[in-house]
Image: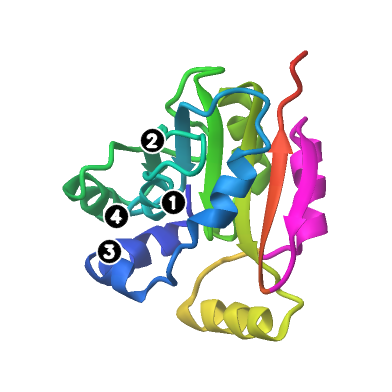
Amino acid sequence: MHGPGDVAFFDRVARLYDRLAPATNPEFLWAGLARADRPVERVLDLAGGTGRAARAIAAPVGRMRAPETLVVDASRAMLAHAAERGTPAVRGDAGRLPVRTAAVDAVVVLDALHHLPDQGAALAEAARVLRPGGVVVVREFDPRTLRGRALVAAERAVGFGSTFRGPDAWAAALGDAGLAPTVLDRGFAFTVVGKKRESQ
């Protein structure tokens, strides 16, 4: 779940969110999904808001066919917009996901993990709902870059309780959740993947 102030903000801006949010490049998400050791047929879009990530991976790439997606978010207004676009969505807390254990092949978290008040619990839950061989794909912003510092300042000005981390710190957090982490790319925006071992 986002912090209480963050949820209230997203409820207010839900109608404009897709126009204000940065464009989503599906290539980074698909590169993360390609790291799975199993077919990616069901994807959870965690803290997914209006379903930007779910829609970004809705078109097949190469030999990978488009998966079924489910958005889980704390903001009713954001989820209403996801549903209006035909994206299956359910309200829930990222630290207590309303999804059964080993139910999905991948979890994607697009530009959202920094908003969650208990990031460790969210990643542990992501690992729980993941099938062996599946992946958690995190797309985030590096607060050490020039643009990252500007983003941190902007979110603080709005009143968000965001906690940003760099790619290596997120990789370590995925490791703490019991996943095998890999940093796929670096920069202002970066991608980190955690794979659930087959023996888990």
Labels 1, 3: front one: 1
Q: Amino acid at mark 1?
A: Ala
Q: Is 8 left, or right, of 101 in this rendering?
A: left
Q: Amino acid at mark 3?
A: Ala
Labels 4, 2: front one: 2
Which residue is labeled 2 in the image? 69
Report whether residue 2 is seen: yes
Q: How is the image coloured?
A: rainbow
Residue 171 screen position, x and y as percent: 78, 49
Q: CA distance from mark 4 to mark 2?
A: 16 Å
User: Which residue is more in the foreground, 28 or 98?
Assistant: 28
On residue 14, the disc is: 3
Asked whether the residues under the numbered discs 3 and 2 touch, taking CB atoms below 8 Å apart as contact, a structural biologist would say no
The quarter of the picture where residue 156 lies is bottom right
Which residue is labeled 1 in the image? 53
Q: CA distance from mark 1 to mark 2?
A: 9 Å
The quarter of the rendered structure image containing the C terminus is top right
Q: Amino acid at mark 2?
A: Thr
Residue 50 screen position, x and y as percent: 32, 54
Q: CA distance from mark 1 to mark 4?
A: 13 Å
The quarter of the picture where residue 115 lies is bottom right
On residue 78, the disc is: 4
Q: Earlier in the sequence, mark 1 or mark 4?
A: 1
Q: From which residue to which does the magenta span run?
A: 164-187
Q: Earlier in the sequence, mark 3 or mark 4?
A: 3
